[in-house]
Each structure stands twice: as C-alpha cells, then as structure tokens.
Amino acid sequence: MRQYNPPDQILRRKFGIRVRELRKKLGLSQEELGFKANIHRTYVGAVERGEQNVSLDNIGRLAKYLKVTLSELFNL
C-alpha cells in the first residue's frame, strides 16, 4: 500500500535534504551545526528528516551557519 504524503510534508522533506547536503558539504555534524546556530542537535536531525516545521528565525540561523543565502537554502 502506498503512503500518502501531504504536500507540506514533501516540502519539509526536500528542505531537510537540502540542509543535510549543505551541512555535509561544510563537514559539520548535526551537533556542530546546532551549536553554531543555537539550535538543539535533535532539532537539526528532525529538520533533516522532514519531521519539523521550521520557523523563519531558525531558517535564517541555518542559512547563516551553512554559509548560504536564503534563496540558496531554498534551492530545492
């Protein structure tokens, strides 16, 4: 049986994949990124798995410490 994925869940998953891709490109662990961005490491993991609906404030922090612009971060 195929699982239904609402559009918002798909968007969160794509965003999470992008965050993970950029984090790994910088050689950072989830813990290191979380520390720099003042975000708990488990929250970073939840974002990367598409489980967390990220606030605008946290999106800004992630972009800053992933060293990308907001538009680059949303290049899904």
Image: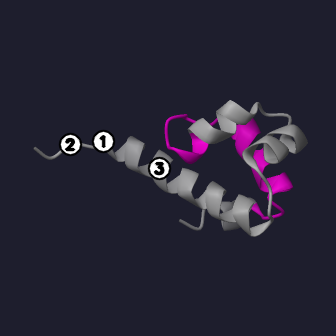
Give me the disc on residue 3.
Answer: 2
Give me the disc on residue 13.
Answer: 3
Left/right of residue 15 with respect to residue 69 in the rendered view: left
Where residue 72 appears, x then y in whole percent?
69, 67
Name the element at disc 2: loop
Indicate which label's residue lies in the foreground, 1 or 3: 3
Q: Which segment is the magenta one?
A: 47-69
Residue 68 is covered by the magenta coloring: yes
Give me the disc on residue 43.
Answer: none
Name which residue lies at 87% across and 38% down. Answer: 35
Give me the disc on residue 6.
Answer: 1
Is the residue 47 above or below the residue 13 in the image?
Answer: above
Left/right of residue 63 with respect to residue 38 in the rendered view: left
Left/right of residue 16 with respect to residue 42 in the rendered view: left
Graded by Cα atoms within 10 Å as few (under 14), some (14 to 19) or many (20 or more), the crowding at tag 1 reads few
Instruction: Report, in whole angstroms, how far the alpha carbon at label 1 lies from the one at label 3.
Output: 11 Å
Badge count: 3
Name which residue lies at 55% across and 35% down. Answer: 53
Where residue 70 appears, x then y in whole percent?
72, 59
Where residue 43 appears, x then y in whole percent?
66, 33
Name the element at disc 3: helix
Mark 3 or mark 2, which is nearer the start of the sequence?
Answer: 2
Left/right of residue 3 with respect to residue 43 in the rendered view: left
Graded by Cα atoms within 10 Å as few (under 14), some (14 to 19) or many (20 or more), the crowding at tag 2 reads few
Residue 28 is covered by the magenta coloring: no
Three-letter code for the amino acid on which mark 1 is drawn = Pro
